[in-house]
Amino acid sequence: MDIETSFATRLYDSARKLGADAAPPAEPGATVAETGFAETLARAAQEITETLQRGEQVADAAISGRGDVQSVVEALTATELALQTAVTVRDRVVEAYQEVLRMPV
């Protein structure tokens, strides 16, 4: 495949880095990078949008006769994976929110 890395892999790497940044610094003078959950989520949403736009561009090029079948299949596979990942993340966030609502106060 021509795709460098899948969206899910990039998202996993971002989450892993976020977890590493949350750990206390190894040295007393070292600082922890300030990357929050909202920033990571915004970056992931931006990557999903870019992947979907890339898929549309490749599909448009193929319809007009400028693209090859392999690039269309690769772009649509990446788009499908990005969409499935976004839906899964959304479902998990909704599930977590509902779980919080069920907690006794």
Image: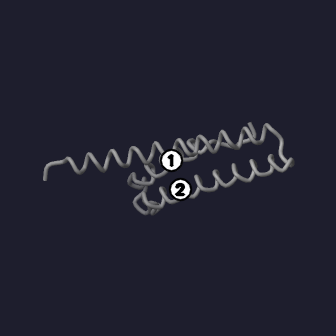
Q: Where is residue 3 shown, x and y percent of the image?
A: 71, 42
Q: Where is residue 29 shown, x and y percent of the image?
A: 43, 63
For disc 1, the marked residue is 86
Binning the other alpha carbons within 10 Å of mark 1 as few (below 14), some (14 to 19) or many (20 upward) gives some
Label 1: which secondary element = helix
For disc 2, the marked residue is 45
Q: Earlier in the sequence, mark 2 or mark 1?
A: 2
Q: Who's the residue at 80% across and 51% down the image?
A: 61
Binning the other alpha carbons within 10 Å of mark 2 as few (below 14), some (14 to 19) or many (20 upward) gives some
Q: Where is residue 12 shown, x and y percent of the image?
A: 52, 44
* Rendered view: 34 above or below 63: below
Front-most of residues 62 and 80: 62
Q: Who's the residue at 83% across and 46% down the image?
A: 67
- Residue located farthest toward the front when viewing the structure as drawn: 63
Quarter-of-image position of residue 28: bottom left
Front-most of residues 45 and 19: 45
Q: Is residue 8 visible?
A: yes
- Residue located farthest toward the right when viewing the structure as drawn: 66
Identity, as a three-letter code, of the amino acid under mark 1: Ala
The N terminus: image quadrant: top right
Q: Where is residue 87 shown, x and y percent of the image?
A: 48, 45
- Residue located farthest toward the left when viewing the structure as drawn: 105
Identity, as a three-letter code, of the amino acid under mark 2: Ala
Give the label on residue 9, or none. none
Q: Who's the residue at 64% across and 51% down the image?
A: 51
* Residues under numbered marks 2 and 1 in contact, where contact means CB atoms less than 8 Å apart: yes
Total marks drawn?
2
Label 2: which secondary element = helix
